[in-house]
Amino acid sequence: MSIQPTQSTDFSLSAEELREFHERGYAGPFTLYEPEEIKDIWRRERVKLLDRSAAVYQDEEAHSGVTNIANYDRHLDQTFLAEHICRPEIVDRVSSILGPDVLCWRTEFFPKYPGDEGTDWHQADTFANASGAPQIVWPEDTGFGGTITVWCAFTDATVDMGCLQFIPGTHQTMFYDETKGMHYDPATVNAVDKDGVRRGFFGYDYRDLKIDPDWEPDESQAVSMDMAAGQFIVFWSTLMHASHPHQGKTNDMRMGFASRYVPGSTHVYPDTEVVEEYGGRVSLDRYGAVVVKGENRNPENRIATETTRGVPFSRRHG
């Protein structure tokens, strides 16, 4: 059975929303699920995720490290997540920014448990920061890069529970050089920064990539993205973003699910058969980007037309 969009409404960003997005680098939050609806869904789906028999990444090496890259791209085997990335409420808004041809090239879970550190300020253009090699490359004539990230709160995401932070307007200038590379060191987890905040970057020190070693993010301009369960935010990966620590004032975890989108002309995972980062390594043998709207315009891309369980992905038209 094919995954079908749940609504036919056009959810494209309005002219004013698009203007604000280009100015700030983010849009939202928008509501996708009602809080009780997503809480019920998440209780059911998190159990299904334990079954890795159809997951595209099976390598034992992927289970090491602070961030488990074996749990990348579970939309390629789990029906709910496959439907989620194709939802018109998401795809129409992303297409407003990227154009008529859109690929979902990666998804990731971002759990934060009581007592977990925050994530350090960072930007991502080609996503070479941890892997050491570009993972997405836009056509040369575009003069830009990055991905549109749709970060959906599967649970409440408050300041105390570790919600996202943005520094508006920082998406058009890269303050980091991803080609410099970072050294993986799990001992950096739960380190305390100069202001006494527990922040890190999954076993890396993102400050190693700063173009100007003396530059510091202007945190006085930071805004916190407090979201209820079922809401999502749309932002450029080149926007300066971070997250608060989970203060442990509640025993509830914070779970975010990020789906990442690029234009159909983008080259996904060029010249590589594996992804190595965060202390893990996975093969791309079973991987494929998903066309969520329009067409794939790069013939070198691996494309998945159905999940590993045989459920076709929906493609948005018009």
Image: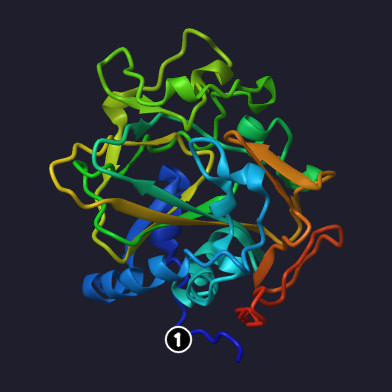
Image quadrant in which you'd find residue 76: bottom right
Residue 289 is situated, as x and y percent measured from the top left of the image, at: 69, 62
For residue 46, side relative to residue 288 (left or right): left
Image quadrant in which you'd find residue 180: top right
Q: Which residue is mark 1?
A: 6
Write the residue at 47% across / 64% down.
Answer: 50
Front in this rendered view, residue 192 or 27: 192
Check the image and name the residue furthest to the top: 214
Write the residue at 57% across / 29% down.
Answer: 174
Name the amino acid type tagged 1: Thr
Write the residue at 72% across / 38% down.
Answer: 134
Front in this rendered view, residue 40 or 234: 40
Q: Secondary structure at mark 1?
A: loop
Q: Is residue 4 above or below residue 295?
A: below
Residue 32 visible (yes or no): no
Residue 6 is situated, as x and y percent measured from the top left of the image, at: 45, 86
Q: Is residue 266 above or below residue 113?
A: below
Instruction: Please state, as top left, top right, bottom left or bottom right, where the C terminus lies in the image.
Output: bottom right
Residue 113 is situated, as x and y percent measured from the top left of the image, at: 29, 44
Check the image and name the residue furthest to the bottom: 1
